[in-house]
Image (cartoon, rainbow, N blue to C red):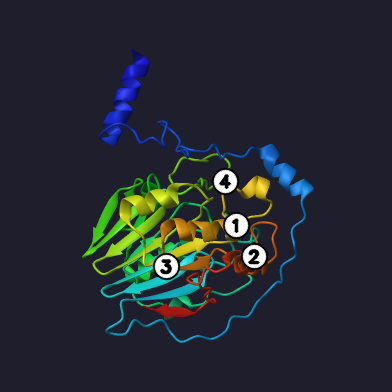
Amino acid sequence: MKVFLLILCMNFAWGKAMPDHFDGKRFFNPRHNNEKSFFDLLKWKFTSKATEWPVSVKNKDYSAPVLPEGKKANFTFINHATFLVQIQGLTFITDPVYSKRVSPFTFAGPARVREPGVAFDDLPAIDVVLISHNHYDHLDLETLKNLDAKFHPLFIVPLKVREFLLKEGLQNVVELDWWKEQKVKDTTVIFTPSLHWSSRSPWDKFETLWGSFMVKAPDFSFYFAGDTGYDDHFRDIKMRLGSPDVALLPIGAYEPRWFMKLHHMNPAESVQAHKDLGAGISFPMHFGTFQLTDEGIDEPVTDLRKALGDVKNFDILDQGEGRLF
């Protein structure tokens, strides 16, 4: 009887039956158990050797991101998983990270080897911030606070992340479950699945949701994959929401495969995701900024070029480089 009442109370809190990716305490991937143990982590660290990265790489100079009248959109790759997306009437930024390190500490943890391709002070007014999940290289609290102070944007985040951000002083935060949507002017933002996980510490794994975004304006759409392993969700998204004009797909942090396969796609899998989505064009991300795994700094791009074959509509943008549509 107590168990029945507990389930009833949890269902009432959700407003209906609980999602198929939540057990009442933690979220999970319905098709895969991708949780790694501490011993798996030790095995990775003691049995593999990471390729050494340079300490610093200088960016090229590109013109400031501007969306002229008569153009539908402008996509600017800032670096890592941060894209500036300008459509007529709205400006988005994805998983913005401007800190020197992606870590709970300012003195340790992965440090950036490239500066952001667009300086923070050069950003245009930001209307919407999309956050795919709460890992430090995707949810950078210092950057979010600076964006909130300067632009007062709408933050769209996964389930259970809103409370954390409100406690940190952010003002305008909406959280979504998979397949739920938020209207912003005449544009619809749909939170969609991914194959990943969440945590900010060793003690809160899977307690907040993760995912990706489909953004549908009246005459233009784009998809932001966040962090993900390869799975059927790309085909599901196309079937339910149609193909995006532009897809932003991760290609880095994939070695060793036995550890990373259910967390991060390799370049060949990203090409398959591009095909599954039927994207008009895709741009790679999540590479060349922070050394998170074993592959070298240039390997994701090199492996992507090998995997593309006769695929012509998967273009690599440099840090700071934009593309008009």
In contact (CB < 8 Å): disc 3 and disc 1: no
- Looking at the image, is mark 3 or mark 1 nearer the viewer? 1
Residue 66 position, x and y percent, is 37, 83
Q: Which callout, 2 or 1, points at the residue further toward the start of the chain?
A: 1
Point 52% across, 38% down: residue:
32
Q: Amino acid at mark 3?
A: Asn
Q: CA distance from mark 2 to mark 4?
A: 19 Å
In contact (CB < 8 Å): disc 2 and disc 1: yes
Q: CA distance from mark 3 to mark 1?
A: 32 Å
Point 59% across, 61% down: residue:
267
Q: CA distance from mark 2 to mark 1?
A: 8 Å
Instruction: Tell me the quadrant of the picture where the C terminus can be found.
Output: bottom left
122 lies left or right of 272: left
Pointer 2: what residue?
Answer: 303
Q: Amino acid at mark 2?
A: Asp
Pointer 1: what residue?
Answer: 266
Residue 77 position, x and y percent, is 48, 73
- Looking at the image, is mark 3 or mark 4 nearer the viewer? 4
Q: Secondary structure at mark 1?
A: loop
Nearest to the observer: residue 98 or residue 209: 209
Q: Residues within 10 Å of mark 3 (few under 14, many from 20)?
A: some
Q: Amino acid at mark 1?
A: Asn
Q: Which callout, 2 or 4, points at the residue further toward the start of the chain?
A: 4
Pointer 3: what residue?
Answer: 146
Q: CA distance from mark 3 to mark 4?
A: 33 Å
